[in-house]
Image: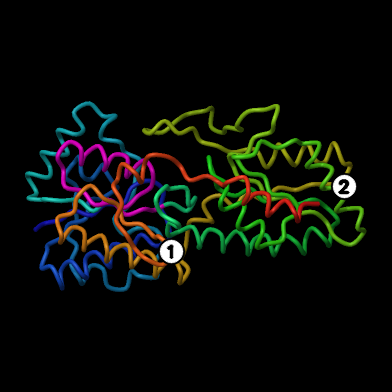
Amino acid sequence: MRIGVLTGGGDCPGLNAVIRAVVRKGVQIGGHEFVGFRDGWRGAVEGDVTPLDVDAVRGILPRGGTILGSSRTNPYKDRGGVDRLRASLDDLGVEAIVAIGGEDTLGVAKRLHDDGVQVVGVPKTIDNDLGATDYTFGFDTAVTIATEAIDRLHTTAESHRRTLICEVMGRHAGWIALHSGMAGGANVILIPERPFDIEQVCDYVNRRFATKRYAPIVVVAEGAVPVEGTLQMAGGGEVDAFGHARLGGIGQRLESEIASRTGHEARTTVLGHIQRGGTPTPFDRVLATRFGLHAIDAALAGDWGVMVALRGTDIVRVPLAEATKELKTVPVERYAEAEVFFG
């Protein structure tokens, strides 16, 4: 069988580990042939491929990003996109696709499966917001990077007696903010699931300054929103092919409000793409590798329309429909655990 592999959406540490595992096991155990679609669904639509054999995936395990490139192309948004995708599969002799991506990429995979294309999905997102899997690879790396940044911000905050705000990724789910904030000893953690009261935030800041010894650290997800406000959007509110607006600016908004309301100097650090760049952690390398191995097992078994998922310590298969049904957001009880340490 000739199988196409693609990576869609934002890049993520661990993507290359999945590609490596799929190809190594698929070639050595299944005798399959592989091609990689360049730049996600764009490559599948346009027939833009690169050969994937064992030599092509040597040495890529510790590399961040993706050797195949990525994009946010949505074939269902382009006129004739799905027909062109089918035609390219026929022309290339590709009988199945292993799609590695998040909610949007796997949403397309689910629709293609419904339309008769043989697809297996692998969950990828640093936000850890995909349903049906306990963790996604890339999340541990993002949390590790954010935690290291928070650890470093503590010393500057204390040296200059100022509030330091760390803005992390998280459009609709605050998992990175929650985990890195707890691990880094933040004094306030703000997430999209819980609209915040700016007066309460400032009260936490003042209480921290009242200790005389320590300065506050505020960790905020990019999608966090004040009770009386709306999402902070950058770039004029433009949206991508999946309808997502570009977010940004909540850190600067907090910096201004905290400084003016408390009388204490505040500064913002926006981690941005640093969180999803560079080499993956050992946890993410192992998880991504296991996902790749089990994805090719599903293909070998002819079990299409599924996504591999982590349940406890086991890798299982779940229908793509279940995987993309709803986002996994931070529950109230998990946020309550962090609130104990606010102020």
Q: Who's the residue at 34% across and 44% down the image? A: 322
User: Tell me, what colour scheme is on the image?
Assistant: rainbow
Q: Given the image, on which type of amino acid does mark 1 rest?
A: Gly
Crowding at mark 2 (Cα within 10 Å: few <14, some 14-19, many 20+): many
The residue identified by callout 2 is 206
- Vertical order, 61 against 235 (above or below): below
* Magenta stretch encompasses residue 41: no
The residue identified by callout 1 is 312
Residue 169 screen position, x and y as percent = 55, 48
Label 2 to label 1, Cα distance in Å? 41 Å
Residue 137 screen position, x and y as percent = 42, 60
- Vertical order, 66 against 101 (above or below): below
Q: Which of 108 and 275 is in front in this view?
A: 108
Q: Given the image, on which type of amino acid does mark 2 rest?
A: Asn
Q: Who's the residue at 88% across and 53% down the image? A: 209
| SS assignment at label 2 | helix
